[in-house]
Amino acid sequence: MLDTYDMRKTDMPDEMRVLLDQYPRDSWAAHPGFAEKTRHWLGAHQMFRQLAERVRLDAEACLDRDLSPETHAERLMQYGGALVGNLHGHHGWEDRSYFPELSAADPRFDAGLAVLEQDHVDLDKVLAEFTRHANRVLQLSHLDPPQAREEVAQVHSTSAVIEAFLQRHLGDEEDLAVPIILHHRLRG
Ligand SMILES: [Fe+2]
Ligand SMILES: [Fe+2]
């Protein structure tokens, strides 16, 4: 299933880690340059991870008949809608505003930012596929329950891809961006 999509399978280039070695993850929170905006940005990432997991677990519960199709459809609309809508807004803002700010402060990491931008493009395709299946679930849950169940299986597999994709993308993005922010005291 994962192979259907262009999910990046390679790690960030080693040279993109030069500041991370200087500002390792466990030192971030105590650094004087670790501002409220960065805390919020990391919090948004955590919310995306949790929403993707929630959507996958709900689809699992529906397929296992631990969650009724009606309840599942309601939750899918709420959590799936929040996941897709907020991710689109987040990626758009990063591409337009956040990445250019990081690049202007330290152009040594432009190759890493290009990798992350491509992740956004590739992730968009999976989000579109997920949205198509989720909409089918909502349309069919009353009209054609057996067909709706097949679509729930697709929601399950695409949400698992989104979850894995986010796992890689968000971690790499944090490892690249936060050290730049701390080093150059951005977004304070
Ligand atoms: Fe991103
Ligand atoms: Fe992000």
Image (spheres, rainbow, N blue to C red):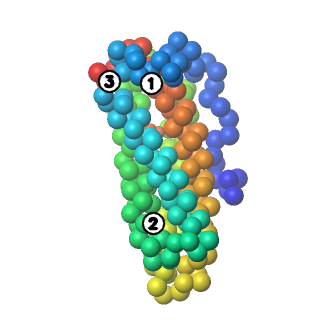
The label nearer to you, 1 versus 3, is 3
Mark identifier at residue 12: none
Residue bearing mark 1: 178
The answer to which of 58 and 92 lies nearer the viewer is: 58
Q: Secondary structure at mark 2?
A: helix
Q: Residue furthest front?
A: 66
Q: Position of residue 170 (x, y in %)?
A: 51, 38
In the rendered structure, which disc, 2 or 1, sits on the residue that comes first in sequence? Answer: 2
Q: Are marks 3 and 2 in contact (CB under 8 Å)?
A: no
C-alpha span from label 1 to label 3: 10 Å
Mark identifier at residue 35: 3
Check disc 3: other Cα within 10 Å, few if <14, some if 14-19, many if 20+.
some
In the rendered structure, which disc, 3 or 2, sits on the residue that comes first in sequence? Answer: 3
C-alpha span from label 3 to label 2: 34 Å
Q: Residue furthest bottom?
A: 143
Residue bearing mark 2: 76
Q: Amino acid at mark 3?
A: Ala
